Amino acid sequence: MKELLGLLAAWSIVLSGLALLGGVALIRRGNRVAHHRAMLTATGLAVLFLVFYLAKWGLYGTTAYGGPEAWRGAYYFVLLSHTLLAAINGPLALYVIWRAFRGEFALHRRWARVLVPVWLYVALTGWIIYLVLKRYGVETGGLTF
């Protein structure tokens, strides 16, 4: 079950990033309706990621890096930047969506230009972290009841 939750989390965030890219392409073509649907799909997939990730974390605890020492600094840089930007990504996404629903498209567009690269970085680094821990992860144990 642990592996399934991790895989579902990884795929949902990657698919979220792909839906985000699709939404950007659609709005550049002027297709607002499809853009709206793609962005809500991206948001829904990001929420699914959060559910899967938190379920895995809550049931099985964390996984520590146990890979080559030479890569440790790079791994923790990616992990730290991913975590900080992921914490910013959620509220920023809600703000951008709120502006779109209110019809405030100038603010929506301005902040979306910040949000999209952050979201894509978080999605890509999330996948990288998943793959690194799949290969080099060390179990730290789950919660005890």
Image (cartoon, rainbow, N blue to C red):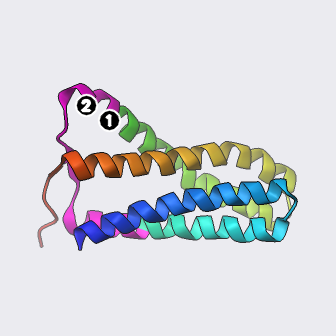
- Please rate how many residues cluster around mark 2, counting C-alpha atoms within 10 Å: few if below 14, some from 14 to 19, many from 20: few
- In the displayed structure, 98 sits above or below 117; it is below
Callout 1: SS: helix
Report the residue at 44% width, 37% height from top.
81
Lateral position of residue 46 relative to residue 77, left or right: right
x and y percent of residue 127 in the render?
41, 51
Q: Which quarter of the figure has residue 83?
A: top left
Report the residue at 73% width, 47% height from top.
111
Lateral position of residue 16 relative to residue 96, left or right: left
x and y percent of residue 27 in the render?
81, 58
Q: Residue flagged by tag 1: what amino acid is it?
A: Tyr
Q: Residue flagged by tag 2: what amino acid is it?
A: Arg
Is the residue under label 2 in contact with that under label 1 (CB below 8 Å)? Answer: yes
- Please rate how many residues cluster around mark 1, counting C-alpha atoms within 10 Å: few if below 14, some from 14 to 19, many from 20: some
Q: Which residues are magenta?
A: 51-74
Lateral position of residue 10 relative to residue 138, left or right: right
Closest to the observer: 74 or 53? Answer: 74
**Is any part of residue 95 visible from this angle?**
no
Residue 145 among those drawn in magenta: no
Which quadrant is the N terminus positioned in? bottom left
Lateral position of residue 13 relative to residue 10, left or right: right
Q: Give me the disc on residue 75.
A: 1
- Which residue bears the numbered disc 2? 72
Report the residue at 77% width, 69% height from top.
34
- In the displayed structure, 71 sits above or below 14; it is above
Residue 72 among those drawn in magenta: yes
Callout 2: SS: helix
x and y percent of residue 144 in the render?
11, 68
Which quadrant is the C terminus positioned in? bottom left
- In the displayed structure, 140 sits above or below 47; it is above
In the rendered image, the residue lying farthest to the top is 70
Report the residue at 37% width, 41% height from top.
79
